[in-house]
Image (cartoon, rainbow, N blue to C red):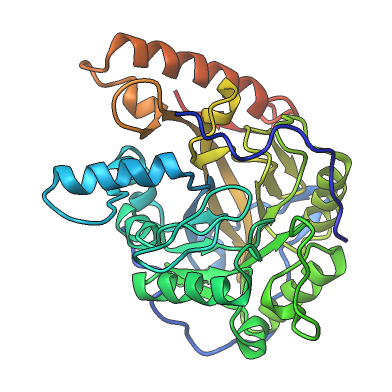
Amino acid sequence: MALCFGSLPTEADETPEPPTVGRSDAAPRPNVVPRPVIDGTPAETPSPRTTGWTPRRFTVVGSGDVLLHPGLWRQAQRDARAAGRFGYDFRPMLAGVAATVSAADLAICHLETPLGAPDGPFSGYPIFNVPPQIAPALRETGYDACSTASNHTLDKGEAGIRRTLDALDAAGLRHTGSARTAAEAAAPTILDVRGVRVALLSYTFSFNGLRRPAGRAWVANLLDLEAVRAAARRARDAGAEVVILSVHWGTEYQHAPNAQQRRLARELLGASDVELILGHHAHVVQPFERIGGGWVAYGLGNHLSWQSFSDGTRDGVLARFTLTETARGRFTVSKAEALPTLMSLDRGPARLLEIPTALRQPDLPEWQRRACQASWRRSADHLRSRGGSAAGLIVVS
């Protein structure tokens, strides 16, 4: 169901969110029954005193688009030189979110662009091919896995997909959304998170007009309701107790979710196919909404990006959800939090700021403090616009 939406400004602006997870997979378990939902409300967690078991819980952090433009890799070069090294160092750029990301039981990034060879050549919009040094930087920041299905997945063809997944493997990052072989595509990505088996799915609404190779559609996942449901069933059959979907969708630069986003969220969360949806692609912050016992973050904005043609394209959010077992093998989202972020590009080095943390720093420059405050207000308004606060969403300040 590849739907293209009207073109607005492009992604090409060139103006110059710990326990171990994902280290090994236990043997598959039998089918897991989805969480119970009664009248749209998840069943309450039983008391260990009466049932003889202790409910498990874990935290998930998801972030917005990692969209590397030339300005960012030039900054990474400067940061490497400042440390007396050659090449590219993206770690200083990400340091502002490392505490929150590394503290999560499971942290998921969205890598929008294909990775090139270590020495390039690199390219930006419209056909991306970016430094693979971003992969170890994401791992050192605390990420455990990345989703890779986006409208740019096919930018450099199958070779680009292989390079990307090879680089993620080398960095110790699990991945989902694209594949090097049919067998890899068919195998669910399941991580052990504090003893809970969590499956990760990733789909995109478009490949920007590029076509998957004939007979090899498995190289990248195209968004379709029944395809997502089939993948979720395969993951459950392989023993997954929780399914998290990362989905590249929506209309660029629009804060309101479009009809496709709203419909698919209702279909997937309402039917308990997945517990949590993390949305990407709009490059601006979109609302969080509770549907049944699950949540959808329609759009997490930009995480790393050089886009600056509007204030909104510098805004992002770390989504932090707590999932709690309500019965053996059945989980629901028990807490939803949003931590707004800002890509600071105006003065000094490009840096990703976690706004609540930055505003607590007494030496934060006044211009940056004002920018953080304005960004927090913008993001909070959008995050709450579909009843999130009434459903329990906490926008951290």
Q: Is residue 122 left or right of residue 224?
A: left
Question: Is 254 drawn above or below residue 364 in the view shown?
Answer: below
Residue 378 visible in the displayed image? yes
Question: Is 397 drawn above or below residue 160 in the view shown?
Answer: above
The quadrant in which the N terminus is found is bottom right
Q: Is residue 373 left or right of residue 363?
A: right
Residue closest to the eye, 81 or 225: 81
Q: In the image, residue 150 lies at what x, y percent?
A: 66, 57
Task: Please identify the quarter of the rendering in which residue 186 is found.
Answer: bottom right
Residue 55 visible in the displayed image? no
Residue closest to the eye, 14 or 8: 14
Residue closest to the eye, 121 or 151: 121
Question: Is 72 drawn above or below residue 121 in the view shown?
Answer: above
Q: Residue at x 83, y 60 (%)?
A: 271
Q: In the image, residue 102 lies at what x, y percent?
A: 34, 52
Q: Residue at x 55, y 57 (%)?
A: 113
Question: Is 133 drawn above or below residue 72 in the view shown?
Answer: below
The quadrant in which the C terminus is found is top left
Q: Residue at x 86, y 47 (%)?
A: 260
- Residue occupying the far left of the picture: 84
Q: In the image, residue 369 lies at what x, y percent?
A: 36, 14
Q: In the image, residue 185 lies at what x, y percent?
A: 65, 81
Query: How many numbered discs, if any?
Result: 0
- Residue occupying the far front of the picture: 121
Task: Please identify the quarter of the rendering in which residue 386 is found.
Answer: top right
